[in-house]
Amino acid sequence: DKLGLGRPAVPEEIEAWDVVVLPDGRGLPEGSGDVSTGEEVFAEKCAMCHGDFAEGIDNWPVLAGGQGTLTDRRPVKTIGSYWPYLSTVWDYIHRSMPFGAAQTVTPDETYAITAFLLYSNGLVDEDFVLSKENFTEIHLPNENGFYPDDRAEVEYPKFRVEPCMTDCKGEVKITKRAADLKVTPTDPDGRPAGTIPDWFEVAQNDTAPEAPADEAQAEPAAEAEATAMAAPDPALVAAGEKVFRKCKACHKVGEGAKNGTGPVLNGVVGRPAAAVDGFKYSNAMKAAAEDGLVWTPENLHEYLAAPKKFIKGTKMSFAGLKKPEDIDAVIAYLSTFGG
Amino acid sequence: VPDPLITQVQPWASEFGDPVDATPYGMPIRFESHVVRRNVPWLTESPISSINFTPIHALEGTITPQGCAFERHHSGAIELSKSDYRLMVNGLVDTPLVFTYEDLTRFPRHVQTFFCECAANGGMEWGGAQLQGAQFTHGMIHNMEYTGVLLRDILNEAGIKPEGKWVYVEGADASSNGRSIPLEKAMDDVMVAFFANGEALRKEHGYPVRLVVPGWEGNMWVKWLRRIAVYDRAVESREETSKYTDLMPDGRARKWTWVMDAKSVITSPSPQAPIRHGKGPLVITGLAWSGHGKIARVDVSLDGGRTWTEAQLSGDIKPKALTRFHLNIDWDGREMLLQSRAMDETGYVQPTKDQLREIRGLNSVYHNNGIQTWWVREDGEVENVEVS
């Protein structure tokens, strides 16, 4: 008894959305890629988070190494040490990577990156070429390292017992205190963040937010009007905030912002290049700074349109913003954050 | 001394309050501003692929308001309108189909309450007590009343071929999170939901449409659901191989550990909810849940597990949903080592952390449902500890 809801999916739609690849190679498109091409593409699209050698920068995932560490206290779970199937690697790169620019890696590039990752893990030689044809011949070392959930056999019989209610154990001692580690976010008073306040203490310091009086309102309004002449168009700034989502994974901005994969961007508009303390710039960026590069809106515009063209060798692997209006917007947005 | 709050006429007893429409879609009163989701910044490299925690220490009852229910995104919470929404069903089906949002609303509707718990809830505590507060140790959980349709009704519309044994569900966001679900579960109680707690899903919970997989780990509750594909095997996607598998002491890993076993935690008192009223009557309250069905009983210990008292289960007890428990005591002002222990209708008793470690070691990351201990000091302050 069908309701007759929905409509048949047409082949082009299924082809567009059904791109999953299974361990037996089903779903792989035609194509191929070699290790050295993979290394180049990886350096361009992946290395800003995963490192040039897939070693992982900061807390971003490590993709290579770690074999033989799965019984260590700190196991290193990589493609070579942990992942069971190469199809998963190919599928994830092709469908979900790079972070912030998913579905921009072509099938040939995906074969090449996958080949490079096999090489980084010591699983193939440097002249290896991965293709649809030889794909299923490759087996990852930990393919047989997984087994289906066996809690029902191993654990449940142990735990499905009548629980003890009295005299269940001897003297009880504290063996570990979280307080010793000091890794919990805290409120300004040093208590764990979000601690329910003492109502009486709160009441004593409480002042209700007053409705602004008429005269008080008039003054800042006049001031705002005066500064509005120089300030960027709020609509453009708002549009820029949206565009900035593409940058957010690597760049922080605003109060308390710190360097991440990219440098903090407070005060970037109008500032000399490579000027943020504590950030490791590429040699290319440092050289540009020595030549006197300043991030004027014009220079930023050119850089954001095609980063690698403007500074050959920049670490910023972002492909660039296609629309000039998006670039204007993001510059307007960034200009609202002082140094 | 007479209390001036009583003897003097207070402004709120004399003057006007807010008119209607002061907040057309209301927010909590400002005195509750501490009751918000919080994250632990060092856990992840980017807030775009991260998690935060429900303030369970400050909530009561069982329903989690959407506005403070924990979020987990793999590539940020996307803005997807109902008009742009499409759901495809393909793979081993008689007729691959495409549905609009409106199409989905025309299937028979179902309303049910379920908990959604991240498999990593408590994951930071495998090596020992680490985070100070129930929000941080147990807050990757929420409990909502969903309105939606049954996945089986949608699958039946496409017609499953006999060789179809698994469904693969996939999201529309850039992470394209996808998980394989065995067909028996898909045809049992899995919902395709569009309302939670009576209102449309929030953006951060998958607006306009998410999957609800009762009793199973949160990663499978795919948000912004865009595709359901029927296969003869599991896809073995990144999220079900390199992540959400449980590394065991012998270096091998359990996979397909979908069910969330019985678990409980005392939400108050707890490190973020200290006792400020001194000795005398004290209400101990907490939450219990099981992915296998209903909670049958919750015991509470005040002495680190030497003796136990059965707590009261308050309100309706629903399968695969949060259950609230209370225990009223007369606190003598002495130190306590508070623990709670859930039992579900299958007879499974929540184990201690050490019992779990004996089997699973310290590297399994996920599915830590061990008993939590709170050390209540004489001054009413509370710490996260482990005991012998």
Image (spheres, coloured by chain):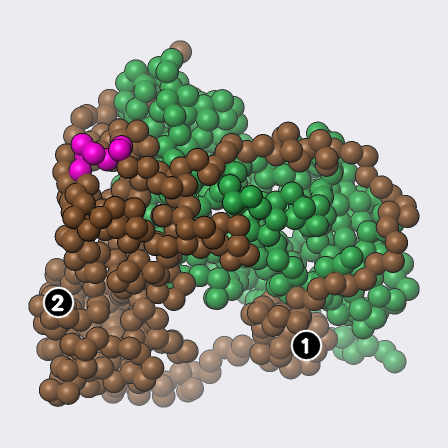
- State yes or no: residue A306 in magenta: no
Does mark 2 fall on the same chain as mark 1? Answer: yes
Relative side of B186 to A223, left or right: right
Name which quarter of the figure residue A53 lies in.
bottom left
Report the amino acid beneath label 1: Ala
Q: Which is more N-terminal, label 2 or label 1? A: 1
Q: Name the residue located 33 percent from the left edge and 48 percent from the top edge.
A: B175
Give the camera-side residue of B237 and A228.
Answer: B237
Figure colour of chain A: brown
Report the amino acid beneath label 2: Lys
Q: Which mark is residue A43?
A: none
Q: Where is residue B43 in the image (x, y as percent from the top left)?
A: 48, 62
Q: What stretch is highlighted in magenta?
A: A131-137
Q: Name the residue located 77 percent from the left edge and 53 percent from the top edge.
A: B339
Quarter occupied by the C terminus of chain B: bottom right
Figure colour of chain B: green
Instruction: Check disc 1: other Cα within 10 Å, few if <14, some if 14-19, many if 20+.
Output: few
Instruction: Check disc 2: other Cα within 10 Å, few if <14, some if 14-19, many if 20+.
Output: some
Q: Name the residue located 85 percent from the left edge and 41 percent from the top edge.
A: A164
Helix, strand or loop at disc 1? helix
Whole-Å distance between the Cαs marked 1 and 2?
A: 57 Å
Instruction: Tell me which chain the residue with mark 2 is part of.
Output: A
Q: Residue A308 carries which label?
A: 2
Helix, strand or loop at disc 2? helix
Instruction: Tell me which chain the residue with mark 1 is part of.
Output: A
**Would you name the residue on which mark 1 appears?**
A203
Give the camera-side residue of A41 and B12.
Answer: A41
Q: Is residue A317 visible?
A: yes
